[in-house]
């Protein structure tokens, strides 16, 4: 079967690849990972069905050859230019209903990457929680260190606080997988949905005794299932990690607020593999993976 493969560079200098025949086609984007020496990405994966596996393989092979010609030592997929543009494939939990902000893909995509030579590089997990688990997490079993306190992230002052959120999130996540800086404008576009999805107590800044912002947490009402909340992100500066802040300053306040608002279902979303505050409370119900070649 003859496969027609097309390529062109977009305005950002990324390679756009398409491969197909007739009405079936696979498409993707490839490029150098911004700010990460020797690393490339493949993202924006698109294919109508697993029947187009030959087209997926052809587009991946074209992208990999182009990246290797640029002496890139490692290539990650999927990564849509940066973590802010979207990354990760769902690899477990397809039977669960999606939540807003979740990476979703056809179940056959991981196998397509494996056949192209990719192997799992890193995993993330989400937990589906019911009322029993939410109440267990809301119990205050620790006191916050003296002087630390919360300042709510509220939708009525959201525009004023968005740049503050970008600054502290960037500082907290700077050493995370494939981190790159994000502009004020791009950050505002990405998180504009929080204006309507926030409720009191579902998002806060964490302040130290001197009033300096040292962390944050953000959750929201799930835009796809309005009777469910999503615990989406937490960040602490390296200087305050290990200070026993996560439970009393993040976990308990978030789930107390969610219960007070009447929510009895939650998703604790996209945790990096490793110990979490959910250990012993529930088992992870969804898995996501970034692959590398």
Image (tube, rainbow, N blue to C red):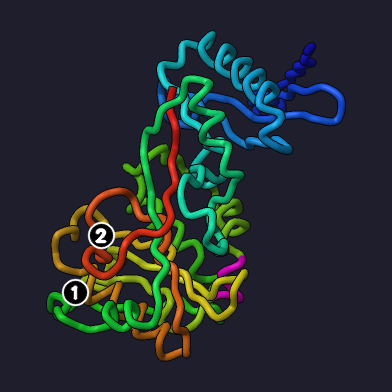
Give left or right: position of 85 versus 255. right
Q: What SS does tag 2 mark? A: loop
Which residue ends up furthest to the top in the rendered image?
69
Give the residue number, with chain letter if any, for mark 2: 276
**Residue at the spot 50% in from the left edge and 82% down from the top edge:** 199
**Residue at the spot 62% in from the left edge and 69% down from the top edge:** 224
x, y percent for residue 108: 58, 38
Q: Main secondary structure of the magenta part?
A: helix
Any magenta on residue 238? Answer: no
Give the residue number, with chain letter if any, for mark 1: 209
**Residue at the spot 28% in from the left edge and 59% down from the top edge:** 236
Q: How much space separates mark 2 and mark 1, taking CA atoms? A: 26 Å
x, y percent for residue 79: 52, 37
Q: Is residue 89 above or below residue 69?
A: below
Q: Which of pointers 2 and 1 indicates the residue nearer the eye?
A: 2
* The image quarter in which residue 143 lies: bottom left
Q: What SS does tag 1 mark? A: loop
Q: Is residue 276 above or below residue 251?
A: above
Q: Quadrant of the N terminus?
A: top right
Q: Earlier in the sequence, mark 2 or mark 1?
A: 1
Q: Which mark is residue 15?
A: none
Q: Which residues are magenta?
A: 193-197
Which residue ends up furthest to the right in the rendered image?
22
* The image quarter in which residue 243 lies: bottom left
Give left or right: position of 283 versus 245. right
Q: Quadrant of the C terminus?
A: top left
């Amino acid at each position: 079967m003859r496969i027609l493969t097309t390529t062109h560079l977009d305005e950002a200098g990324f390679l756009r690849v398409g491969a197909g025949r007739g009405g079936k086609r696979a498409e993707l984007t490839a490029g150098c990972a911004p700010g990460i020496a020797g690393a490339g990405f493949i993202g924006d994966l698109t294919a109508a069905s697993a029947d187009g596996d030959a087209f997926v393989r052809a587009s991946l092979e074209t992208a990999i050859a182009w990246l290797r010609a640029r002496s890139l030592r490692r290539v990650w997929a999927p990564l849509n230019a940066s973590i802010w543009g979207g990354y990760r494939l769902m690899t477990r939990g397809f039977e669960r209903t999606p939540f807003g902000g979740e990476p979703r893909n056809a179940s056959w995509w991981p196998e397509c990457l494996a056949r192209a030579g990719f192997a799992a590089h890193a995993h993330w997990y989400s937990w589906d929680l019911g009322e029993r688990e939410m109440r267990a997490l809301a119990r205050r079993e620790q006191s916050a260190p003296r002087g630390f306190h919360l300042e709510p992230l509220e939708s009525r002052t959201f525009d004023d606080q968005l740049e503050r959120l970008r600054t502290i999130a960037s500082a907290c996540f700077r050493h995370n997988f494939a981190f790159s800086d994000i502009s004020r404008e791009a950050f505002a576009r990405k998180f504009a949905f929080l204006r309507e999805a926030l409720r009191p107590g579902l998002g806060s800044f964490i302040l130290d005794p001197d009033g300096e912002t040292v962390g944050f947490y953000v959750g929201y009402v799930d835009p796809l299932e309005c009777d469910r909340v999503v615990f989406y992100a937490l960040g602490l500066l390296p200087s305050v990690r290990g200070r026993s802040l996560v439970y009393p300053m993040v976990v308990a306040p978030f789930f107390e607020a969610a219960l007070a608002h009447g929510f009895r279902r939650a998703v604790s979303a996209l945790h990096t593999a490793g110990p979490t505050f959910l250990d012993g409370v529930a088992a992870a119900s969804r898995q996501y993976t970034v692959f590398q070649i």
